Amino acid sequence: MTVLALLLPQLAKAVESPPSLAALRRQVELAKTPQEKADKLIETGEFYLLKPGEDQEDMDNARKYAQAAMEINRQLRSHRLAGDILFLMSQIEKESGRKEVGLQKLKEAIAVYRKARLTGSEGLALMELRHYYDWAGPGMNERLRIVQEAIARFAAAKDTVNEAAAYVELGDLYQLQENATDAIISLRKAITLYQAIGHKNLQSVYNLIGHIYTATGDLKNGLNYGHLAVKTATELKDSSMVAATTYNRLAVTYSKLDRLETALELLQKALMFSIKNQWDDGTVQILGNIIDLSIKRGARMNAQIAFLEKFLVKNYSKITPFVRYTIEEDLRMFFIKSKNIPKAKYYLDKCMQYEREGNLAFNTHLYYDAVEFYLLTGNVRLAKAYLAKMEKLKDAANDPFISQQYYLVSYKTDSASGDFRKAFASHTRYKTYSDSIQERKSKYELKVMAARYDLENKDAEIALKSENIRLLQKDIASRNEIVIRSNRLRNITIFAMVILVLLLLSLYSRSRIIEKYSTSIAKKNGYLQDLLKEKEWLIREVHHRVKNNLQMIISLIDSQASYLSNDALHAVMDSKHRIEAMSLIHQKLYLTDNTSSINMRIYIKELVTYLKDSLGFNRNISFTTDVDEIELDVSHATPVGLILNEAITNALKYAFPGTMAGKIDVSFKYCDERKVSLTIQDSGVGLPPDFDPDTVSSLGMSLMYGLATEVSGTLRITGEAGTRVLLTFSLPDVFLSRSPGDELVLSNE
């Protein structure tokens, strides 16, 4: 378990010290309602559960209080109490060594919370559930899933404190999987949540982010977050295990920067906090870092080594055996590396006392150092004896690192004894294992580089989002200014309305004079209505005649076409289709009551039908139209119709060579209240790869771009997955008050 996981409950709740047992019992007696009494019984059970040590009597007392609460809830039938009781019982069973029973009760508690929609309690139960799964393999994946689910429950319950703590746990799990990108994203979310509620104890989160950056080789960010963690710990006067971890990790970063003096100072502070909190695992890790630093600095570390020796002598009876033999092991390694024979012999003999109790890793290092020491002193016989012991561990461990160390000292031993053939074989095996380890290291470094690249991309993405937020805030400020101006305008309007009322009152006296002229005005209005009707009839007649004239031109073109062939015929027929598109507009104008605008839904449907019948040649090509209820005046409808004519004509000519089947989709839709777009998409062969609309000089292409300019629009032609023609333009102001109609899809297949 990582340090952060051990400290997660402290991060999740910043609560006052729990009440004493006597106070809890008093609260049970004074409870005014059965529900309050049940809550206090559960709280008392938790008190016994969380007492230091593993006393069975405490577990029995906790179970007694849980059962008492259960009896009360038989009458209350409270889902929350039922879940809380099951949650407590699961922890009691786990602490009593019955993990399977504890797991079953915990799952029952989660089911009760979920059924009652108690999302916050369900989140806490899920965070307890994660402890039942391992830190590696499938267990780690299940832990990740459970913590992610708990985050969702805390978010639904608006439990920001526990949501942030769960994100910290998630980040810690990701970094154990060496997934630096997701780890830092999770930890930054935790920081955001903590800062939103004013939570200041963020040194654990900062130092974990710094540790991850350092592990990926981003020492700059590692240093920044490490110093931020130290600053926060100092401001909050933190002297816990978190402080030890904070200084230790920052020291590692400085060590990678070859700032060894600074790293040593930080390690000494970390060691002080670790010893103060009696944190054996931390003390061992920090001492190991100090020894590694000592080996790098050589004779310059004599004062530090002397301090460790004095510390060992002074606190020999106070520190645990684990810490004691770890310090002696570190000193042994240092003195052998520095070739201090008397000191090396002393600590080698001290460590040999733990040979029977030592695990595989401890004894492997012990025998390795023994071989190195006796080779250093020229005692090849004893070196071979410890080499034989190391060989047994090597065979049992099947670990490439142990095998590499074994063959290295085997090579040195065989060389010292003059058996050069065997030495050569050992050296060959040593190189084989070294190459294998180096290959693993290279793969790991590539993985680290990939993680660092992902982190840099995420940082860039976050920076972009921050800039977007800044722009949004600026936009909000602008909108607020507009609101202020609107309020000012409203006040002015109200004042103007008051003045207007006064004016109306003053004009009322003249109303009677106006009444004399009302009859005359009514007659004039009637006359104007007659003129308007006559004007509309004349306009309709003009459109009719224009349509007839255009039809006459079409007839002439048809007559002329019978004497033409090839390119000339194609050019004439293209002109005919263009005139037909315009003719259809004038036909619509004189056949409808509205002589000022064209219903584009009907017009496009009829134009597409005409073009299909004229150019389809009974080929297996289907048409689909999707047109909103849009009306345009003649000046806009004509260019749109001509562009549609050109696009469909080109598609039928060139998009489907031979007998190729296909589909042409036509849509004319609102983009927003002010803009509309015309899209003609075919499923044909598309455009050539080197197609450039700016360099094409065909009449049809020039005509489409010119017509797009007439409606102040933009025309885009692309050739992926068929050819797509897109015209976008703004509606004239006269049509802006009309809301987009319900969409209707018309099929001409």
Image (tube, rainbow, N blue to C red):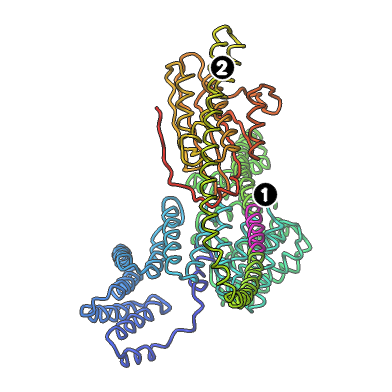
SS state under label 2: helix
**In the rendered image, the vertical position of residue 737 relative to residue 160, given as above or below:** above
Q: Which of 353 and 19 is in front in this view?
A: 19
Q: Which residue is drawn at 60% across and 62% down?
A: 208
User: Mark 1 or 2, which is nearer the eye?
Assistant: 2
Query: What crowding class fits label 1: few (fewer than 14 Cα within 10 Å), some (14-19), or many (20 or more)?
Result: many
Magenta segment: does it hold 471?
Answer: yes
Of the numbered discs in the image, which one, if any, rests on residue 375? 1
Measured as percent of width and height from the top left, residue 730 is found at: 60, 44
Q: Residue furthest left?
A: 75
Q: Which of 576 and 7 is in front in this view?
A: 576
Q: Determine the main secondary structure of the stretch shown in magenta.
A: helix
Q: Residue at x 58, y 30 (%)?
A: 643
Q: Name the residue under label 2.
A: 573
Measured as percent of width and height from the top left, residue 289 is found at: 65, 62
Mark 1–mark 2 Cα distance, whole angstroms, equals: 102 Å
